[in-house]
Image (tube, helix red, strand yellow):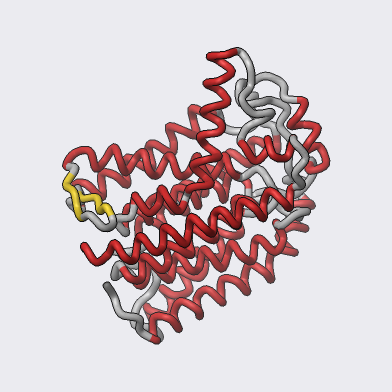
Amino acid sequence: MKEIHIANLIEIFSYSGLVFLLVISFFPKFIKLIQKFKLTQKIRSQGLDGKKSPLFSALHAHKSGTPTMGGALVIAAVLLVVIFSRVLSYFGILDHSILNRGETYLPIATLLSVGVLGLIDDYLNITERSAQKGLSAKVKLWSLVLFAVLGALWFSFKLGWSIIHIPGIGDFDIGLWYAPLFIFVVVGTSNAVNITDGLDGLAGGLLAIAFGVFSVISYFYGLPILAVFCAMIVASLVAFLWFNVPPAKIYMGDTGSLALGATLGVIAMLTNSVIVLIIVCGVFIAETLSVILQLFWKKKFGKKLFKIAPIHHHFEAIGWSEAQITTRFWIIGAGFGIIGLILGILGMGNL
């Protein structure tokens, strides 16, 4: 387990502070720009089964016209600071940059590539230039699978990874099953975050907690540059939440939810913390399971299990305010985060 060094902490707080200032400063201008080009939220009228959902429309009609694609600035600020660190490193002002082959190449590539996928989906949805109001579910899924396959091939064949770590027990070599596991984790985490992103501040807050946990885990795992990268994402998300808490002035969109979810999955694999990821993402998993159960229940029994899915909308339908749901889910997410962090750090004794 890595010891704490003051230089590493200074680096974490310096870069995170810079990202926070960039996002908090530019978001008001970004919101005006989004409004100018009318890149605003379109409220879906269909449910999970493709049929009209008047309940959802009634609950969220007031959100129509709210700027979206806020995830673009969240991602851009992080990438801009990464480039800035590389420039400083190139001229010898810093010893190293955040762009590091062994620690951040794959997370940065994931954040950028899946962010572009989400941006295209958001743009098509907003401008209604496709019959599906965005990319079709199949196109999004297979695009995510493609990105995950490339990452899995890099991990399995370039880096030779085949081990998963179970905290408190030890390491297990799963051989060729590592690549399918990698794909499942990245695609699953991306979709789970995307499903959860349905209320003001909900996904942003839960993601900030999750990346905060993995920043600490990355550091003690011996990946201090990755820890800085995670902390930068936390700072960017916290600044975003300033404008996204109820009532939201801007939404993250698929640009942010898909990219940040996929990146979180990649970081979990980099730190050999799949089990910890399952715990930390407890709320995301519950949201996804609520959708699966809703579809299964309706097909099997001909009726709904929840008033509306994902489950955050069910609570909304039974009378909880948006702020209550968001805050309570944050509290639950923080609890999962603390448990995951403790398990992850204590489990490193077996590494």
Q: Is residue 310 above or below residue 152?
A: above
54 on left or right of 125 = right
Quadrant location of the N terminus in the rendered image: bottom left
> Nearest the camera: 32 or 260?
260
Which of the 4 image quarters holds residue 222? bottom left
Residue 203 is situated, as x and y percent measured from the top left of the image, at 59, 50
Residue shown at 57% from the left, 39% from the top: 195
Residue shown at 58% from the left, 60% from the top: 74
Residue 237 is situated, as x and y percent measured from the top left of the image, at 59, 61
Q: Is residue 121 above or below residue 162?
A: above
Residue 108 is situated, as x and y percent measured from the top left of the image, at 42, 58
297 on left or right of 167 = right
Residue shown at 52% from the left, 40% from the top: 286
Q: Residue furthest right?
A: 62
Which of the 4 image quarters holds residue 125? top right
Q: Is residue 6 above or below residue 146?
A: below
